[in-house]
Image: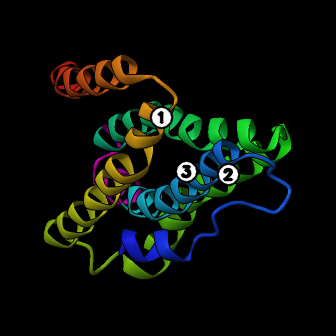
Amino acid sequence: MAMLIDEFIPEAPRKVPSEKAGKLYRIGFVSMIALMIHNFPEGIATFVSSYDNITLGSTITLAIALHNIPEGISIAMPIYYSTGSKAKAFKYTFISGLAEPVGALLAFLFLRPFINDIILSVIFATLTGIMLYISFAELIPTSRQYGYDKVYLFSIFLGICIIPLSHVLMG
């Protein structure tokens, strides 16, 4: 699915003058689409967990809010540096973020009686695959082209360390 999205996303808008800026724009735009798809079920998960147990829902909401910060940066930075427009960077990030409350609202309105652990597991596994594709096919190669070999390796290692640590700390 991510490869299909990747095929239909334009390389860059006509205003972007350089090849590097075009690649950055593409990364930001593809990240926005992927994160919209990723955020939608997060909204569902937030709603379902809060509906059943407010303490669990609060914990999940906090964890999702914290991990949305780097997600937003992964959209805003490439868009800003490719277009020079803070407004476009904000707009694309905001649009991506709207998918989460929309997911929660639709879960409340339509899906509440049908949601179970198996359906959520399948959705999250699919979205994890999409995010890995974006990381390996778009983000890492572009990072290497800009000469950030050590930075991207350190970032991957840091993410691998932080995720289990956050699970332990959050209980």
Query: Which mark is first along the chain, 1 or 3?
Result: 3
Callout 3 amino acid: Ile
Q: Which residue is mark 1?
A: 145
Q: Is residue 8 above or below residue 25?
A: below
Q: Which residue is mark 2?
A: 22
Callout 1 amino acid: Gln
Q: Is residue 7 above or below residue 120?
A: below
Q: Badge 1: how crowded within 10 Å, few (<14), some, or many (20+)? A: few
Callout 2 amino acid: Gly
Do the numbered discs 3 and 1 sit on residues whose CB atoms are within 8 Å? no
Query: Which mark is first along the chain, 3 or 2?
Result: 2
The structure residue drawn at horizontal position 42% and vertical position 77%, both measured from the top left corner, is 4
The structure residue drawn at horizontal position 30% and vertical position 79%, both measured from the top left corner, is 113
x and y percentages locating residue 136 in the rendered image: 32, 48
Q: Magenta part of the protein: which range?
A: 45-55
x and y percentages locating residue 137 in the rendered image: 36, 53
Q: Secondary structure at mark 3?
A: helix
Q: In which image quadrant can residue 140 be found?
A: top left
Is residue 138 shown in magenta?
no
